[in-house]
């Protein structure tokens, strides 16, 4: 590869890693507080739809991102209500949220835009160009500082590690977890926004394509820490960018390699990473309790 091709691959890696980064950070906040967040896929999906819809109406990517974050937080509120006060099984409830998002986005698309496949294409002025990348980097740094050096950050850590001690200190564990899940939804919604108004020019049905689960894998691979999780997102993003460049390759006899074999590369890497490292990761002690 030439120098320009390496730079292009690096830029592509940063772009495709951005949605994973926001979703992984959202999962990190939630799971550090003790709430498993299988619902990242659904939160990203509604965020992507809301962002594209708001950007279409307002012509502003910033308003689109705000709409995506609000939609993600709203759906996260539904999830939080089922698992915190109602004490539903967190894995089952998260799966239900994913199914709800997969069904409600085409329904809303049919109602708002007379199409179940997606939203109208956005002009360049209504899309982001590089801002989400830098916002993601800033959020990683702020998240690291927040959990280590602020009182509320310590509350979140204790809610996931030793909720009894937090309760004994007079801090309501349920309230901390509520806020953490809502923040998680907003960040995952920003991840979805990065898909529809940054990497693409519109929302398309089921466009998250498993990225919420890849973000969860990056979080586990990163041992529930923001910086290692961000590096894991870059790893997955690299293989995603690589599979885009590899499409069109052929065997030695000139026969083209089926594109499906190449597209599966980032998902295969995700499985291999989890198979090799999930047993070595130490989750928060009160996760899921």
Image (cartoon, rainbow, N blue to C red):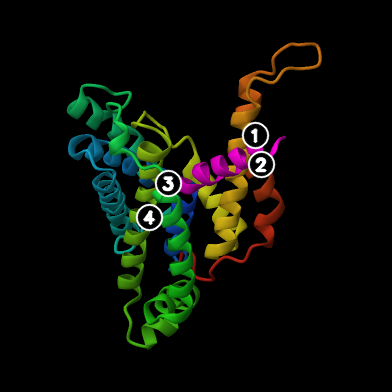
Residue where numbered disc 1 is placed: 265
Residue drawn 39% across and 40% down?
198
> Under tag 2, what secondary structure?
helix
> Under tag 3, what secondary structure?
loop
- Taking depth in this image into account, of 135 and 42 the one nearest to the observer is 135
Between label 3 and label 2, give the one nearer the viewer.
3
Residue where numbered disc 2 is placed: 269
Quick one: which residue is furthest to the right in this view?
A: 252
**Residue 130's disc number:** 3
Instruction: Tell me the quarter of the picture where residue 30 sits.
Output: bottom left
Q: Is residue 179 above or below residue 194?
A: below
Residue drawn 36% across and 31% down?
201
Instruction: Tell me the quarter of the picture where residue 289 sits.
Output: bottom left
Q: Provide the major secondary structure of the magenta segment.
A: helix
Q: Is residue 191 located in the magenta-colored stretch of the structure?
A: no
**Residue 187's disc number:** 4
Packing grade of label 2 (10 A; few <14, some 14-19, many >=20) is some
**Residue 62's disc number:** none
In terms of sequence position, does the residue under pointer 1 or pointer 3 come before the other? Answer: 3
Magenta region, residue range: 1-19
Disc 1 + disc 2, Cβ < 8 Å: yes
Residue drawn 42% across and 46% down?
130
Disc 1 to disc 4, C-alpha distance:
26 Å
Residue 99 seen in the current view = no
Disc 1 + disc 3, Cβ < 8 Å: no
Q: Is residue 44 above or below residue 282?
A: above
Q: Is residue 140 above or below residue 19?
A: below
Disc 3 + disc 2, Cβ < 8 Å: no
Packing grade of label 3 (10 A; few <14, some 14-19, many >=20) is few
Disc 1 to disc 2, C-alpha distance:
6 Å
In terms of sequence position, does the residue under pointer 3 or pointer 4 come before the other? Answer: 3
């Amino acid at each position: 590869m030439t120098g320009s091709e390496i730079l292009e691959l690096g830029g592509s890696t940063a772009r495709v890693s951005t949605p994973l980064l926001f979703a992984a950070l959202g999962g990190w906040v939630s799971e550090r507080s003790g709430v498993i967040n299988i619902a990242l896929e659904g939160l990203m999906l509604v965020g992507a739809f809301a962002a594209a819809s708001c950007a279409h109406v307002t012509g502003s990517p910033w308003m689109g991102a705000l709409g995506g974050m609000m939609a993600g937080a709203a759906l996260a509120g539904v999830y939080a209500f089922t698992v915190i006060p109602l004490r539903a099984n967190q894995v089952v409830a998260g799966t239900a949220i994913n199914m709800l998002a997969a069904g409600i986005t085409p329904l809303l698309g049919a109602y708002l835009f007379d199409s179940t496949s997606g939203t109208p294409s956005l002009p360049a002025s209504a899309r982001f160009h590089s801002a989400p990348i830098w916002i993601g980097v800033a959020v990683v740094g702020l998240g690291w500082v927040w959990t280590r050096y602020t009182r509320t950050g310590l509350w979140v850590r204790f809610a996931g590690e030793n909720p009894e001690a937090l309760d004994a200190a007079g801090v309501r564990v349920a309230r901390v977890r509520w806020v953490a899940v809502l923040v998680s939804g907003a960040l995952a919604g920003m991840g979805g926004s990065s898909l529809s108004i940054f990497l693409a020019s519109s929302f398309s049905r089921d466009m998250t394509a498993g990225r919420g689960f890849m973000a969860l894998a990056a979080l586990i691979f990163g041992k529930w820490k923001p910086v290692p999780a961000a590096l894991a997102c870059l790893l997955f993003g690299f293989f995603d960018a690589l599979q885009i460049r590899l499409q069109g390759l052929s065997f030695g006899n000139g026969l083209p390699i089926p594109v499906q074999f190449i597209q599966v590369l980032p998902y295969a890497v995700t499985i291999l990473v989890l198979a090799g490292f999930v047993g070595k990761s130490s989750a928060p002690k009160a996760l899921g309790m």
